[in-house]
Amino acid sequence: MMIQIKNRLLKYSAMLGICWLIVSSISASAQERLTLDGAIAKALLHNFDIQIAQNNVAQTTTNNTLGNAGFLPTVQGNGFYNFSSMNVKNQFSNGTTQERNGAISNNYGGGINAGITVFAAGKAYVVKKQLTQLQALSEEQWKLQIQTTISQVIQAYAQLVLQRQQIMAIDTALSLAKIRMTLSEMKYASGLSAKVDFLQARVDYNTRQSDSLRLVGTTQDMFADLNYLMGEDPYKQYLIDDSLSFHQKIEPQQKEILLQNNLSVSIAQRDWEVARLGAKAAKLSLLPSLDWTTGYNYNKTQSQSGFALFNQSLGFTTGLTLNIPIFNAGNLSRASKIASLQALQNEIRYEKQHTEIARQYRRAWSAYTISHSAYQLEQQNIAFAKENLDIQKARFRAGLATTIETREAENSYVTAMVRLYNAAYNLKLSETRVLELDNKLVE
């Protein structure tokens, strides 16, 4: 009887292996293979937040010009023509009277005029520095968005890998429950064991099937999240890796180096510098400024009525204009004070970010150290659970172990698998967070 049972188990295992190969080959041909590096590459090309940040860089770069700062002159050409037909009655001081109906008048001309601010207490230099800082700020925000997006992609991909591994663990438990159910059924049919063993195995088998279906359903939502980060169709699915790789050498950064390299701290410092320059420019607006204008204009007027029937002017003009802000309802002083308060607020934000990043890094490194130790411990634990399962399976086939003992060994092994996969997932997340704070996700 035991020989027949072993033959049936071998036959079942062979059929299960063939079915698995067929399903795997069909899935592989229907879906695209996606690695973590491939997911990151797609996100760098198509992620919406990265594209928005890149567009902001283009805007600030376009704005950072000498002309926008006020260094260059403005040159403007103009032309005009006016026509009128009017009934006119003029009475002059010498007693004569002129009266005419439908008097036609033509006025036309044109010219080129230029102007430039000769002196504004150095405001143009301050504005140019501010524009340069704004450009650098947008570039760092773009880099930070790249780091953030890569971190999000790694987390989303790692979650999918964890989901796949959990499905593998459930499938392993399903296979073990199936084998135990078949053995229990044959033992019950031959009178070697009670029916309760078969019923328990059947319950376990159905429970594992339900768990597998639940995990497969959740996977669809996870693919939608990853596709959003990559700018892909939310309904698209891929074949992903079944394991995660880790960085072998990560050393904690010194506080000074960390704060020097961290993009969030640098952005806060840039914000402070932009506000400080804005406050300086607002104060310079309270000082006098000197403008120079010049032009070459032509003007001709012809009229059928009035004292002068013809008037024409052509020539060059130039001049200086001194602007002294004496009183503007207090708006200039108010704007200067608000700009100074904004600079102070941004300085406080910089100090806050400085402290916050140090706090986050300390917590991230602590989490990474614990996760690394837990992962190594779970690697050892899975070997013990596998050895225990093999021994219990052999004892159960030989009739030396009970169904409860075998079921406990199976559950311990599946639990050890899930714990190992979760430890790997947590290690990947903590590692990613440390590298993100170190500004090393993109090098």
Image (cartoon, rainbow, N blue to C red):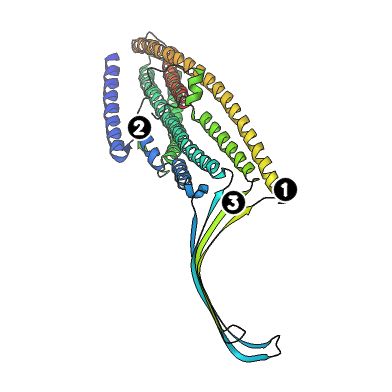
Q: Amino acid at mark 2?
A: Asp
**Which residue is labeled 1 in the image?**
330
Q: Amino acid at mark 3?
A: Leu
Cα distance in 3D space between marks 3 and 1: 21 Å
**Which residue is labeled 3 in the image?**
290
Which mark's residue is nearer the viewer, 1 or 2? 1
Q: For the N terminus, give its image quadrant.
A: top left
Q: Mark 3 and 1 residues: CB-CB less than 8 Å, in contact?
A: no
Q: Amino acid at mark 1?
A: Gly
Judge the density around disc 1: few (<14), some (14-19), many (≥20) Cα neighbours within 10 Å.
few
Q: Mark 1 and 2 residues: CB-CB less than 8 Å, in contact?
A: no
Q: Measuring 50% from the left and 56% from the top, which residue is drawn there?
A: 74
Q: Measuring 54% from the left and 25% from the top, which residue is drawn there?
A: 357
Which mark's residue is nearer the viewer, 3 or 2? 3
Judge the density around disc 3: few (<14), some (14-19), many (≥20) Cα neighbours within 10 Å.
some
Cα distance in 3D space between marks 3 and 2: 59 Å
Q: Indicate the position of residue 288 as horizontal and vertical percent values.
A: 63, 48
Between discs 3 and 2, the one toward the N terminus: 2
Q: Considering depth in this image, is 319 or 256 the residue closer to the camera?
A: 319
At numbered mark 1, what does the secondary structure look like: helix, strand or loop? loop
**Which residue is labeled 2 in the image?**
37
Q: Measuring 51% from the left and 30% from the top, which residue is drawn there?
A: 266
Which mark's residue is nearer the viewer, 3 or 1? 3
Indicate whether 62 appears above or below 24: below
Between discs 3 and 1, the one toward the N terminus: 3
Q: Indicate the position of residue 126 as horizontal and vertical percent values.
A: 55, 41
Residue extending farthest to the top is: 400
At numbered mark 3, what does the secondary structure look like: helix, strand or loop? strand
Cα distance in 3D space between marks 1 and 2: 58 Å
